[in-house]
Amino acid sequence: MEKAKHFKAKERKPFRVRVIGWLLLILFAAAVVTVAVNLVINQNFTVSFYSVRSDKVTDNIRIVELADLHNAEFGANNEKLVSKIKMLHPDLIVYAGDMMNYKDDNYSVLFNLSDQLSEIAPIYACFGNNELDQYLFRDKQFTKKLSEHNVKLLSNEAITVDVRSTALQLIAVSDDVKQFDIETNNAKKFLERLSPTDNCRICLTHYPELFKSKLLNRGIDVALTGHAHGGLIRLPKIGGLYSTGEGFLPDFTAGVVEAEDGTQVVVSRGLGNSSYIPRINNQPELVVVDICWY
């Protein structure tokens, strides 16, 4: 006669361990859903409008700023981007750097976009770190090629532009904070030679963190910047989480930030991405700056 088989009851994990396991699973699922939703949202861009008042202009002037495109496209040949900019009727269009990617010799996205936008308004640009590295280390003809597509790239220089009976001074600063500390720094030399002006001085620079110290008290009325990518992940009531220029919880990530000397620093969240970290609560952004007459 066969002996009865005895089975040992499987021990259940403690209740607290099971709860923690379920919570971790829920958090993981929520993170996956959040990333997926943001990836969909980030296929399009939002338009942000910022107003800056100045008694140095005689009429309202509209500037559309693009930054950190990183060869992204919104529709075929960037038709969504071009169509929206056309509807905004800008007086000037500016590129605040990193419109393309370093080590990518295919400039077709940037050049095709520039050909279309130059029919809407004059385009002025400054170096971002990607353009500057491309020019210095890979393609000495890059700036010449860009000019052939109707983009005036300024590097540590100043020009005067007449817009709606107002003379604007556009200056461009190419170097980041670390480069400023080099004794032979080109941007520092340029700024030392820069004469005072009664015109509205608009600074194009890729690096908003320069307005923590390096670009203070330079007679700049408005600055148009990028680079921070909105802080990558934006936290409610806190803002951007991280930027390569300032580290964690940076001050300059989005919107209009007033520097210590009163300079109105416009920081674009950018249109593209250059890292594997997804943009969360941080939709790509096209910036419109209205310089308003008092």
Image (cartoon, rainbow, N blue to C red):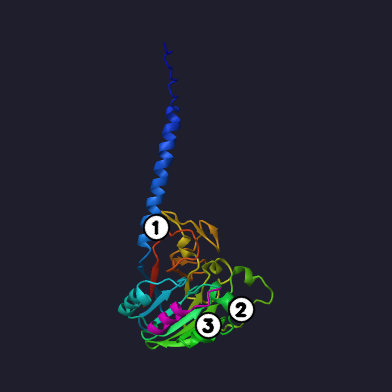
Q: Residue furthest left?
A: 87
Which numbered dot is residue 294?
Answer: none
* Image marks 1 and 3: residues in contact by CB distance under 8 Å: no
Residue at screen point 50% across, 68% down: 227
Is residue 278 covered in magenta? Answer: no
Q: CA distance from mark 1 to mark 3?
A: 33 Å
Q: Secondary structure at mark 3?
A: strand
Which numbered dot is residue 136?
Answer: 2
Does residue 233 appear in the picture of this structure? yes
Give amino acid for label 1. Asn
Give amino acid for label 3. Leu
Q: Secondary structure at mark 2?
A: helix
Residue at screen point 48% across, 58% down: 277
Q: Secondary structure at mark 1?
A: loop
* Magenta residues (range): 103-116
Give amino acid for label 2. Leu
In the image, residue 154 sits, relative to residue 50, either above or below, namely below
Judging depth in this view, the residue of 246 and 222 nearest the camera is: 246
In the image, residue 143 sits, relative to residue 28, either above or below, namely below
Which numbered dot is residue 154?
Answer: 3
Which numbered dot is residue 281?
Answer: 1
Q: CA distance from mark 2 to mark 3?
A: 15 Å
Residue at screen point 45% across, 59% down: 278
Dominant SS in magenta: helix
